[in-house]
Amino acid sequence: MSLDFEAPIEELEKKIEDLKKQAPESGDGIDKQVSGLQTELLGLKKKIYSNLSPWQRVQLARHPERPLIRDYISLAFDEFIELHGDRCFGDDRALLGGFATIDKHKVMLLGFSKGRGVEDKIKDNFGMAHPEGYRKALRLMKLAEKYQIPVVSLVDTPAAYPGAAAEERGQAEAIARNLTEMAGLETPIIAIITGEGGSGGALGIAVADTVMMLSNAIYSVIPPEGCAAILWKDSSKAPEAAEALKITAKSLLELGVIDGIIDEPLGGANTDHAATAMALRMALIKQVGALKRTSPRKLVGKRLDKFAAMGRYK
C-alpha cells in the first residue's frame, strides 16, 4: 500500500520493474538504464522522506503495514513470557505485558496491541485500552519494581477507549493512578513511541526516565482530526492541525518532551520490520544499561524534575 505522496516513487519503481522484465532480451543497454533509474529512485526517496510534512508523518505512523508490538517482540527481544489480568476485573488484550529479555537485560515489557487483520483488530479493540489494561500495566510495573527490573513501554495507541463501559469502570482514575505511580516508581522506565502516541491513553504507560520516538511516529494531546473538529469545526483541516500541534519527533525533541529519536529505514518502518526492530533493540540496550547504573532514588528525582520542566515558558 502506497500513500498519496509516495506516488512518484511508485511510478519510478514500476518503470524499473518493467525494464527488468525486458532485460534478458535487450542486453546491456537496459541494464544501464535500470542502474541509472535506481540511482534516481534513491535520490527521489531521500528528497521525499527528508521533507515530510507533519500530516504525512501521521499517515506513516498509521500505515497498516507498520510493525506492531508482537513484531517487535519476535524481532527485537530474545524471550517473552506474557502475564495476564488486573486481578480486579479481567484481561485487556489491547494492552499486553510480561517478562522479556533483551541482550543480557531482563525487563518488564508493556505495550499496546492493535492487531493485524479485522478479527484481531476487533479483539484488541484497535489498540485502545480499557481501565483493566492500565491496571494490569500498573500491577506489572509494581512487580518490576519489587524485583528491580527495568520497565520498557512500547507506545502505539490512538487513545484510551472512550466508551461508556470504560468510563463506568474508572478509565480516568486508572490512567491518573498510573501517572502518579510511575512518577515515583523506583526502577528504570524507558518508553518508545513506535506509532501513534495519543493523549492520556499513551501517557498512561509513558511517564519514563527516557522517552524516545521512532522518526515517523507521532505523539500528541489529541489526534489532528479531533483538534481540527474542535478549532475549525472541520475535520478536513487535520493537516493544518498536525502542523500546529507539533506532534513529530523532531518538534518534540526541540521542545524537550522526548529525549531521543530512533531513525527508521528510508521509506518508513513499514518497509523493513527487521531493520526497524534492530534499531529499536540497540537503542533499548543502550538506555537500559545506562539507567541501571543510577540509584532508584536518583532516578525518581530526575524523573520528577524532567516532567516538571516541560511546558515552562521563557
Image (cartoon, rainbow, N blue to C red):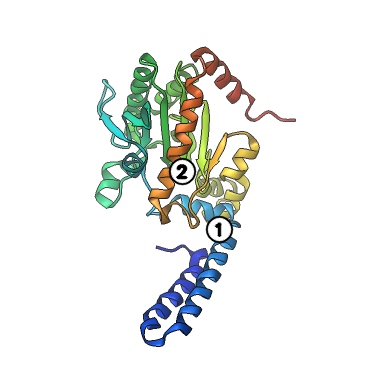
State the image quarter where residue 48 is shown.
bottom right
250 left or right, relative to 29: right
Q: Which residue is mark 2?
A: 279
Q: What's the residue type where badge 2 is placed?
A: Ala
Q: Which residue is mark 1?
A: 49
> Front-most of 113 and 259?
259
> Dividing the image into 4 quarters, which one contains the N terminus?
bottom left
Q: x, y percentage for residue 66?
A: 40, 51
Q: Dots 1 and 2: beta carbons under 8 Å?
A: no
Query: Is residue 238 visible to the viewer in this orientation of the structure?
Result: no
Instruction: Identify which residue is drawn at 64% across, 37% down.
Output: 255
> Front-most of 307 and 69?
69
Q: What's the residue type where badge 1 is placed?
A: Tyr
Query: Which secondary structure, mark 2?
Result: helix
Which residue sits furthest right? 314
Instruction: Identify which residue is drawn at 59% across, 24% down.
Output: 306
